Amino acid sequence: MSKRRDIIIGVAAVIVIAVAGLIWFMPGSGERAPDVRFTTLDGEEIRLADRAGKPTLITFWATTCTTCIQEMPYLMAMYEELGPKGLEIIGVAMDYDPIRDVERLVEARELNYTISHDSDGEIARAFGGVRLTPTTFLIGPRGDIVQRRLGLIDMERLHDRISGMLPSDS
């Protein structure tokens, strides 16, 4: 009986994971991105609505998240290439991360894109209660969520999608 119970629990877990995957790994629903404000580590305030007309990548991360750290060099390279064409990347450090740890990691990794610390969890709540990292949202030029992703990003596909949203070099 115990083996049968374990199989049923295993099947139920697979179903739950599959449903969560369908929700998180599908392209965005076209829903409007929340009009949140980010305060950068340098104290600058950025309002997401002010980014209209340009794509913005928002990535929630934590200093203890190895996948988040693994993505950082790719995000830096993408920002170096596409930032001058209009891409904004905002890395949002989770509220459970001590600010000193966030600042040390940003300095050690020499991150070249904007970093904000979600000290009160307000930004994560505005994006549907983000708790797991990395969680990434691509906001299109019209301010809609065009892609959301929980877990490691396919950087090549993301790069192509963002490039298609930017003005071409004519």
Image (cartoon, rainbow, N blue to C red):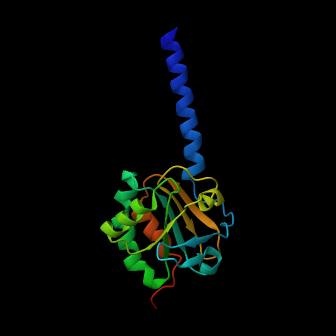
Query: Position of 53 compared to 84: left or right?
Result: right
Q: Nearer the viewer, residue 66 or 27?
A: 66
Name the image quarter holding residue 155. bottom left
Name the image quarter holding residue 80. bottom left
Residue at left offset 58%, top offset 77%: 46
**Residue with the most extreme bottom position:** 170
Report x, y in % for residue 81: 38, 79
Q: Nearer the viewer, residue 81 or 161?
A: 81
Report x, y in % for residue 23: 60, 48
Report x, y in % for residue 151: 46, 52
Report x, y in % for residue 149: 52, 55
Residue at left offset 54%, top offset 45%: 21
**Residue with the most extreme left position:** 108
Residue at left offset 69%, top offset 63%: 31
The image shows a total of numbered marks equal to 0
Q: Is residue 163 above or below residue 60?
A: below
Q: Nearer the viewer, residue 110 or 137?
A: 110
Q: Is residue 10 above or below residue 22?
A: above
